[in-house]
Every structure is written in C-alpha cells, then in structure tokens.
Image (cartoon, helix red, strand yellow):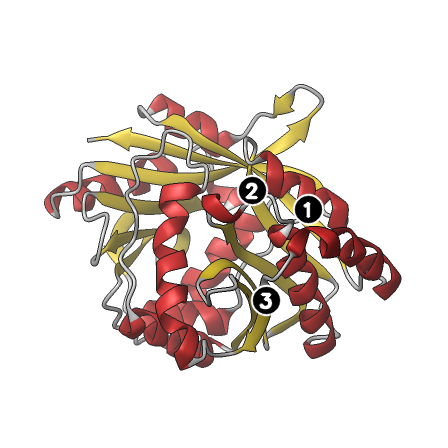
Amino acid sequence: MDIAEIDVSDDAQLEAFWATAKEADEFERPYAAYWSLEAATAAMRADSRAFERRPFAAFDDGEVVGTGQVMLPRLDNTHIAFLVPMVKPSHRRRGIGTALLEHGLEYARSRGRTTVIIEVNRPMTDSGPGVSAGHALLAKHGFTDASVDLHRVLELPVAGSRLDELEAETEEHRGEYRLVGYAESVPDALIAGYCHLQEAFNAEAPLGDLDIEPEVWDEARVREKEELFHRAGRRECGVVALAPDGEMVALTEMVMTDHQPEVGWQGGTLVLKEHRGHRLGLAIKIANLRAYQEAFPLVRAVHSWNAEENDSMVAINDKLGFRPVEYLVEMQRKL
C-alpha cells in the first residue's frame, strides 16, 4: 500500500477519490448526505484565499482504498488543521486508517499547525452516542471529544399552515425588527453586517472545548465563497433580521445543489446575544424555509447539525419538525 497526494487535475483519479470517500461516508449511515462529485471537484480545484486543501489517498495495486484531506485555514485559526481520513469498508482493519491519519498529522506538523480537528459520526442509542469504528480509532491515537452535535433531518415540504401557526408565535415578540431575504448572492448593502455576523459565529455559538478562534470575514471572502458555490452548482437562500436602526442582528442560510436536487442543508443560524428574546431565530428560519421551499420544490430532506448544549436552536428546530438521526462528534488533538 502506498499513500500519495492525488492529482486534482486528473478527472479519473479525482472521481475514484470521491467514490471511495462517498462509499466510506455512507457505510451503515442511512441519513448520510455526502456532497456531489461536481461540488467536490469544484472545491478540490479551487485556489482559495481562505483554505489550503490537500487531498491524498491510499493505493493498493493502483486501487484507491482510502482517502484523506488536510484543510488549513489561511485567514484565521492558522494554528488548526482539519483532517478527514476515510477507508473503504471492504479494506478496514488493515491499518489503512492509521496510515492515513499519521500521514495527515505529519503534514499538519510540517505546516506548523498545533491543533488537529476531525469529525466522526456515531449512531444514536437510548443512552447517547453509540459505537463507531472511527471514534475508537481516533481515541486510540490521542483524540478527545471536543464538541458533540446532533444531526437532524427535516422532511419537506413543511405545510404552509404549520409555518403560519409558528409565524403567529413570533409576531407579538418581534417588534420593529425587519426581515430581509436574499438568494444566491448577499446584496452589497448587507455585506458589512453579513461579515460581522459570520465573525460572531465562533464567538457566540456553542463550541464546546474546540480550540477555535473567531473567523475573519470581508467582502472578498464572501464573494469567493459565492463564486465557489456557483461553480459547484450550489444554490443558497438567506434571511437576515435588521434592528430598527438598520443594524444586522440575525442571519440564517440554507443550501441545495443542482446535482442533488432532492437534498438540502441548513447553514448557520445566529442571533446576536443582545438581540435575543424577540423570537428572531424562529422568525428568520420560518421566512427562509418559505422562500427555500418555493425556490427548490424538489428538495425532500434538509440536514442540520446543532451542538447539544444549544438549547434555543434545538427548540426552534424541534418546532419546525427536525428529528435527530445520529451524532456528529468533533474530536481534537493538540500536537
């Protein structure tokens, strides 16, 4: 077995990499929502100012039997490496996962990174997260649980009558806050507020013990993300809340892709601390869900991830009809 970086300009090699990772990600996970080949290709070939991405693979007689990615933030959190090792189910328990992990860790060290974060999925049981081979492997190599999210799924469409009922709950609390929606691209007039909200996510959202600092956002980063989404066939709906003085104080986003028209993803939702208590989180999610269902009627399931301790967002998702299906654990190791 050999481990080597893949040539992202080689269509066949990139597709073999993607297919192996998809098979590994979906194994024994009925609610997996792996990204499309087109979206993966766009991300792998992007020259991003925000992230450096290094994909590599384990080869056995020329066959891709395991994959790995190292993602290095460039604009912020430059002490962190995000690592994604995955092994083809038929080739597990042969040391491939360990080899991929060690390869990724060595690259992180060589780039001066001191914290490595890896996401692993764990099944739901009556007593909490169940047994996961990936979780066991990482624990053996010194990784510890830093944050636990619940993966939830919302079946679409949600009846308009249910959204009307929930919207009525928000009206008496919302006061003079105004909701503004957008699609595909953040309007120029909202850019400054949008960047402020993006930077506030890591400061105000529950992160457990993750060694993560607030991100740095400017218009160039927003437009680069939008351009990457365009090339990947991803489409986005967003709604923001504006205070009476015009300040942007809340944001929510939802995404789908042209190549998987039946699947959707809930992006981040945040209400600034000093503006909570006005049901803005529920109000913006209702407004965005209405627009999303109208724009993308083929979507049948929306996937969302929330930290267990984020009680307010969990309550909102419960009201909307999201149901938990598995756990996502973010594991961390200091090098």
The CA distance from mark 3 to mark 2 is: 25 Å
Mark 2 or mark 1: which comes first in sequence?
Answer: 2
**Image quadrant in which you'd find residue 118:** top left
Q: Position of residue 84 (x, y in %)?
A: 38, 47
User: Number of numbered discs present?
Assistant: 3
The residue to which callout 1 is attached is 317
Q: Earlier in the sequence, mark 1 or mark 3?
A: 3
Query: From what the image shows, is residue 301 above or below residue 227?
Result: above
Which quadrant holds the C terminus? top left
Residue closest to the eye, 40 or 226:
226
159 relative to 17 in the view: left or right: right
Vertical placement of 174 versus 120: above or below? Answer: below
Name the mark on residue 306: 2
Residue 290, percent across and down? 72, 68
Viewer can see residue 30: no
| Gap between marks 1 and 3 measured at Cα | 21 Å
Q: Residues within 10 Å of mark 3 (few under 14, many from 20)?
A: some
Residue 332 horizontal/vertical position (percent): 34, 32
CB atoms of marks 3 and 2 within 8 Å:
no
